[in-house]
Amino acid sequence: MAIKNKTALVTGAARGIGRGIALALAKEKYNVVISDVLMADCKKVAQEIKKIGADCLAVKCDVSKKTEVENLMAKISQKFKKLDVLVNNAGIYPAVPFEKMTEADWDKVISVNLKGIFLCTKSALKIMPKASRIINISSIAAFVGFEGLTHYCASKGAINSMIRVLALELAPQKITVNAIAPGAIETPGASKSLTEEAKQQTIAMIPLSRFGLPQDIANAVTFLASEKSDYITGQTIIVDGGWTLR
């Protein structure tokens, strides 16, 4: 039995943080919709969710394309009738020094990381009842500068501003809008991009002396999705082991 028959959508759910969030919501007995451009990996996550005992729907979707987002929401409406929790997690972070950054580099990151949230949120609201939840995955890159990631940092900073406005506009419907800003999280993508020396240097910057895990972010998501967070809206929760305290 799903949690009061509630349905959650996680974008970018094929790997890493998105996968961790999807599995955590499944354990909380939500119906879980997972979307990604990597459909083969999406199907693997769907199998994991089914083993947990939750109902699941996997849909291929590029969040930067309006037609694909609308197709995603139509499939959710058809199978589950409504959407109670939207987790905008899909994001990319290709490193390019600013002087070498092209307009295409900039547009691609902004389209996925920011326009994707605009498209998904706008379309999802058509099938979201009162007291639903919108949770955007931001980053400490909104607060700390990372060389080679001007476009990524800009997109994440914009997310933090966007949630405050949306929280005000959607408050009459009792829909809360919040963001989570992860620090350094141990994911397949992060592991491949960092040398062992770089990993140790990163850990040295984190007061809690470890990389975060997808479950650390998932725990914050399940809290914001729950009734325990009823009175929290327009906030960015930093989950970084203390990195930004320095």
Image (cartoon, rainbow, N blue to C red):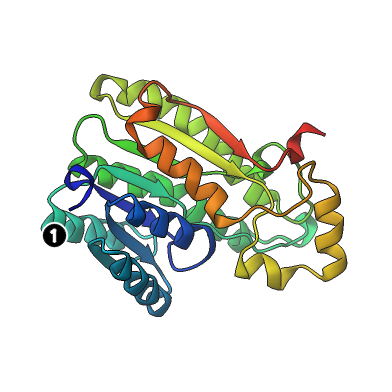
Q: Is residue 19 left or right of residue 6?
A: right
Q: Is residue 33 above or below residue 243?
A: below
Q: Is residue 228 left or right of residue 172?
A: right
Q: Amino acid at mark 1?
A: Lys
Q: Is residue 236 left or right of residue 75?
A: right
Location of residue 62 in the rendering, given as x and y in whole percent from the top left corner: 39, 64
Q: Is residue 135 visible?
A: yes
Q: Quadrant of residue 138?
A: top right
Q: Quadrant of residue 173?
A: top left
Residue at image x 58%, y 45%? 155
Residue at image x 71%, y 62%? 95
View extreme (bottom): residue: 40
Location of residue 130 in the rendering, given as x and y in whole percent from the top left corner: 21, 30
Q: Is residue 64 visible?
A: no
Q: Is residue 8 above or below residue 198?
A: above
119 or 26: nearer the viewer? 26
Where the C terminus falls, by quadrant?
top right
Location of residue 211 in the rendering, given as x and y in whole percent from the top left corner: 71, 54
- Residue that badge 1 annotates: 79
